Amino acid sequence: MKKKKISIISLDPRAGASYAGEVESLFGEYADISMFNVMDGSAMGKLERADLFVVSTDAYGSAEEVARHVPMDCQTMAVEVSFRWAELRKLKEIPAGSKVLFVNMTQTMAREAIAQLNQFGINHIQMIPFYPGAVLEEEVSIAVTPDEMRYVPESIETKINLGQRPCTSGMMIEIALRLGLEKLLETEKFQSYFQAIATSNYSFDQMFSRSIRLESQFHILMGILEDGIIGVNEKGEIFACNKRAEEITKVSASLIIGRRCDEVFSYLPFLTCLMEKKPVPAKINRINGINVSVEVVPVLRQGECIGAFARLQKFNEVEVRQNELRSQLLQKGHVAKYSFDDVIGESDAILRTKEVLKRMAASESPVLLIGETGTGKELFAHAVHRASRRKDGPFIAINVAAVPENLLESELFGYEEGAFTGAKKGGRPGLFEFSHKGTLFLDEVEGMSQALQIKLLRVLQEREIMRVGGNRVINIDVRIVAATNESLEQKVEEGSFRRDLYYRLNTLPIVIPPLAERGEDMFRIIDRFREELGGSFDLTEPVKEFLRNYSWPGNIRELRNVVEYFIYTGHEHITMEDLPPTVFRKHGAGLRPVTAPLMDREAGAVRNQEKDTVPGNDRVKTSAEDKAPAWKKPAAESQGSQITGKEDAFWFVLEQLYLASEEQTSIGRERILMKARECHIPISQQEVRNILTELASRGLVRVGRGRGGSRLMPAGRQLWESRP
């Protein structure tokens, strides 16, 4: 028999070696195993053909990228990892209630592993995700890691290394089936492997179509499935009942095999399914005092029904799994970032607002934040969530007015596969589902169409949704916090906003005070922005008086822009001449407009033209210039360097990609722009996009789609490390 060829593709060489070793131990006699990984460049370019490519999910950024490297007519499947029962027993020995760091390469990998450990019953300890770049904020003495000891803080007293996470038994079964090596599943090596690996759900539908000719393998699968499974033939006679089904029904399989289903399980709709040849959707049955989700699916062969299977799940376990899946789909970032402590101010207006909102946070009723643009309504929405009983759930924000009406419905409610042209295969959950057990913040809610207002009203009344193109009702538990900068009462009178929805949202209304009504809070906020932006200046009395009398139509958002402008003037003492020209145009108050200062962006210093012509008025370097590396300084001060502004930006972007690669992660455009602002590097989003495109065209960077971020390739690392 000619040997098969299996190619293992991973991001990290260490993980790839572990996966390849396990596959080799089970299939080495019948297949040649090759290993490729992204970090050393061996997985890039068109790979040689293989009977099967097994690809880790973090290796390539998308299915399109997989297609660029893997021959299209070759079989591919994903690497799936689990834990060994022996390692889980070690974790069971940790005292209940202990705080434990779970250390992994990235935040996503750490959280995914923690979710899987919870699924396996490791719920008696509090696991805290830790990864390169994370800050250890709590006192913790125990750390657990899947062979990533290099990232465990030295201060940790007890370190438990679980070793590289092994491949799941389901993955090994899939490899055997894909390569026609089913006979190996009954060997002692496979049986030992299955017993050692902690099991998770495996797709029964995928396996059953092969079970007629693979009866023994079918019994193996029945043993590892976590759901209760009961099978009947075309006559309604029971031929299969796994251990999980025995536990749920309290019936011994040995006593019921061969008996008719209606005699043993009268509450299971087997006969209906066999006669109608259609699935019976999941319903809740009361079995032995517990709620059980029961669905029955027929087995069809050439149009004939040759049997049916019932799938039994304890209802509370179904809900836990759904919540875990929602958390995994969110990936990262959907958490409230701010609390009431982040709201700066001591004025009566802001203290009263915070006090009232703290009391509102304890309620489950909708909150309506009313305020002018830029007053910080979203910050208060974050704070309300953090102070509520839902603080451990997701917090998701969406600006209703910013999303086109034809997309907003699918964004909020999700959609089923084929609901419209361009709909993703398998459909997509909406923000209401993602927000389950948490808070959904609807900004500028007045921009919602009448049709969507009706659907939102139903959500608030019935706590259920239906995806676009779907026919299944989905129960959700979401708290709504809405915000508006317009008068909803007037909108109601005009007929553009539904009165019934207004009264639903207006349960707990509060007005966020504008900046002009917050008195000396303005200067406290200026101090905070100046600190965040790394600037150094003070305001003269005429400027302070001017700012007190200014109307601030843009509120705190406009104030931040003014602070950033002050920093770029390069002056320690801000005078009336240093005020932004836009402020004078809006609120001149009889003051003479001044010419905007010229900004030497590369140097980070701003000087007024008239002052630069005064004899003896030498240009003073800013502290930012003194501390900047030579390649960030003006050409005249960089020891004769001729690096242009464009070249500065190129090397800065490459540096950020390099630093991200050192942390084993990717970095997006917004993160690069934020870093540029921190370093006072003048660069626009379009410039960042152009540089990334150029780097990608030269094979130095892999640019991910959407929010996937960009990742430095080996050639890019070499370029940075050999820079002049």
Image: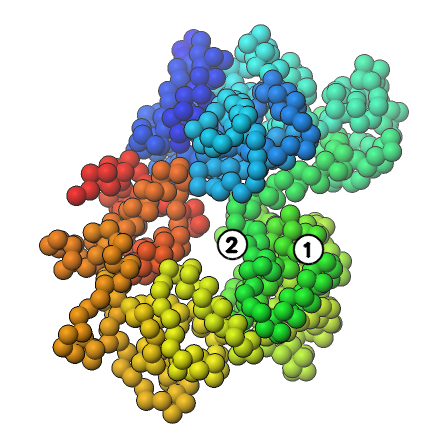
The residue carrying mark 2 is 421
Q: Nearer the viewer, residue 591 or 279?
A: 591
Label 1 secondary element: loop
Residue behind mark 1: 388
Please provide percent x and percent y for residue 301: 65, 27
Which is more N-terminal, label 2 or label 1? 1
At x 77% / y 25%, what residue is drawn? 245
Residue closer to the observer: 290 or 414: 290
Residue type of the residue flagged with mark 1 = Ser
Estimate how packed mark 2 is, as few (under 14), some (14 to 19) or many (20 or more) residues with alpha carbons within 10 Å.
few
Total labels drawn = 2
Q: Is residue 529 left or right of residue 518?
A: left
Residue at 83% in and 34% down: 290
Q: Is residue 450 above or below residue 51?
A: below
Q: Residue 543 lies in what quarter of the image?
A: bottom left
Q: CA distance from mark 1 to mark 2?
A: 40 Å
Percent position (x, y) of residue 577?
A: 31, 80
Name the residue located 63 percent from the left edge and 40 percent from the top edge.
324
- Residue 514: percent from left, percent from top: 55, 76
